[in-house]
Image (cartoon, coloured by chain):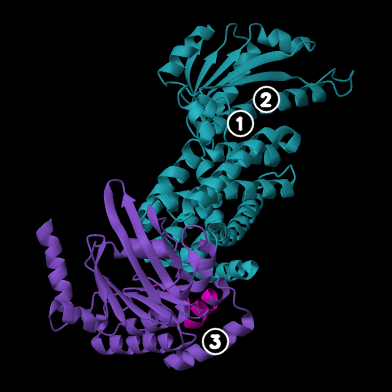
Amino acid sequence: MTAKAQAISVNGLTRRFGSFVAVDHITFDVGAGEVFGFLGANGAGKTTAIKMLIGLLAPSDGDAHVAGFDVKTQRAQIRRSIGYMSQRFSLYDDLTVRENIQLYGGIYGLSDDQIRDRTATLLESLGLSGSAGDLVSKLPLGWKQKLAFSVALLHEPKIVFLDEPTGGVDPLTRRQFWELIYAAASRGTTVFVTTHYMDEAEYCDRVSIMVDGKIATLGTPAELKAQYKVATVEDVFVRLARGAKASE
Amino acid sequence: MKGGALRAFMIKELRHIMRDRQTLTILLLMPLVQVVLFGFALRSDVRDIRLAIVDPSPDYATTALRNRFLGSRRFRIVSLSRSPSSIEPLFQRGEADVALVFEPGFATRLASRTEPARLFLTVDASDPNTGTVMQNYSRAVISQYEAERSAVCRSVRSDGPACPRPVKLVTDTRMRFNPTLESVNLFVPGLIALVLTLVSALMTAISLSREKERGTLEVLLVSPLRPWQIIVGKVLPYLGLAFANVITALLAAWLVFHVPFKGSVLLLLAESVLYAIVSLALGVLIAARTSTQRTAMLAAMIGTMLPSTLLSGMIFPIASMPAWLAPITNIVPARWFIVVARGIMLKGVGLPYLWRETLVLCAMAAVLMIAAVRSFKPRLA
């Protein structure tokens, strides 16, 4: 497969901070429309890797293509092709639901008509039509997260990056959130998601587990469980993460 | 489409500002409150002025004038001597506020009417404001004496030949310790600088570091918005607010204290915008280097507000600063702006006299803006 056919194509991507190697020659591909789980313990290098993919950090070595664009030289094109929802909640509390949508629509170059149409669709699908004029600060956390995800998809990006999108909410709300993720994937959007919840990892088409800056394993949840002869992805994760500690 | 992105971003900034009503109210009323407070606080009424008199050859005229000072409730004569050398020690020990020195043969000169009779007035202006007030009171006593003498002269000779010339006293006034005088008038340009610094540097630093702290800045940097668009979008609404503040401060100064405005209002507004741009860039730089709102606020206070108040010549004249400190004031933007604002407001001069200061501000604005945009480029090092 060529790099162009993949939504994300990473080859030997490395980032050093002084003598510390945060991301150490990682290589993987993510197919179009795939839900890709990017797992790893805290400090394993996930955030550094994502920052390189979305153009917030330059790689020290190796290369990566996102939506067919080079992360080193075509950052502007990448920005137009991706959506991003950070682990720190990305909407403005002191603006209303509608104002937040207008802001991101405007930033991503949608016309006023497009913004109006998509706002109506979005609010309806989230069941928030009655709250369009409410301040975001008044919404419950789960709704904020769903809204933030929908706003990240407003400009219909090819790929959406979700950095721990479901922190701090109950299992039911997380389940609803994942329904939104599947809906987006079924429309052809590639979803690149990091999470700490191993039950969520089971929902992904494929997962990779990062340990000490390297990708320790990669495959479908079923493949990984078979390979390590365990019942859940969580067990795979724990075994790999424990191995990392032993080697220190 | 870039214009649309910038517009959307600026609308968001305006909404942030408008929604926070309390902060907005404070920001809009601040120049008014500051001008009024500073203005009244500076109008200190001075009583019990300690006067030292040097009278080398006492005569009827000097005695009359001395009695006038005695008669005024504001003055108290603490020393009367024949030699001017007695004054210096008095000032050094802080035992006198004002010294009045008659020249020898005062009455003779006064009577001759060909040469003016001279008086030297020395005022301790280590507190410049009190110094001005004391000087004005002393002059008032002297001119009252002058006026009455002229009146007497006219009434006595009303039917005879006309009084040749009104009696004239020349007071040669020297301010000790602090030759440049500060007054309410001189304070207003400084206050404009202070208000502009506060709104521009402090508010931008807070607003940008809030985005950083909350993680929204990261989302903006991942969006198609360019770093310069983020900065322009942040800065322009505050520039508008700063503009409103300058006008409020000028109106308050004019209506409440009748501070004169001699030069071009347009030029002052243009220079204010230039100075605001310098401050805004500083605010952006501070936000780039700090990670929380609290640190950004403290850094902005210490890094911009304090120098703008203390090292700008607003309160303490640069000329009276120690030799090592005076050159440092050159890097304080407010120091240059205050020269410009005073020149325009109080002297009525224009660009031909102020181009050097304006150029310095332009250079500062350019360098700081470039640095600010760079500091917000995603960390690619």
SS type, badge 3: helix
Residue at 34%, 63% in the rendered image: A49
Look at the image and tell me in which quarter the N terminus of chain A lies: bottom left
Dot 3: within a 10 Å radius of its alpha carbon, few (fewer than 14), some, or many (20 or more) residues? some
What chain does mark 2 sit on?
A: B
Q: Could you give the CA–CA distance between mark 2 and mark 1, rounded to whole angstroms?
A: 14 Å
Pick the front one: B291 or A23: A23
Q: Nearer the viewer, mark 2 or mark 1?
A: 1
Q: Are circles 2 and 3 on residues that touch, CB within 8 Å?
A: no
For residue B241, side relative to residue A150 (left or right): right
Identify the mark at residue B136; answer none if there is no mark: 1
- The kind of residue on which mark 2 rests is Tyr
Circle 2 packing at 10 Å, graded few (<14), some (14-19), many (20+), is some
Q: For the residues marked 3 and 1, what is the alpha-carbon distance in whole angstroms?
A: 72 Å
Q: Which mark is residue B145?
A: 2
Question: Quadrant of the image for the C terminus of chain A?
Answer: bottom left
Query: Disc 2 versus disc 3: distance between alpha carbons?
Result: 85 Å
Please tell me whether mark 3 or mark 1 is closer to you in this view.
Answer: 3
**Badge 1 density bin: few <14, some 14–19, many ≥20, Cα 10 Å:** few
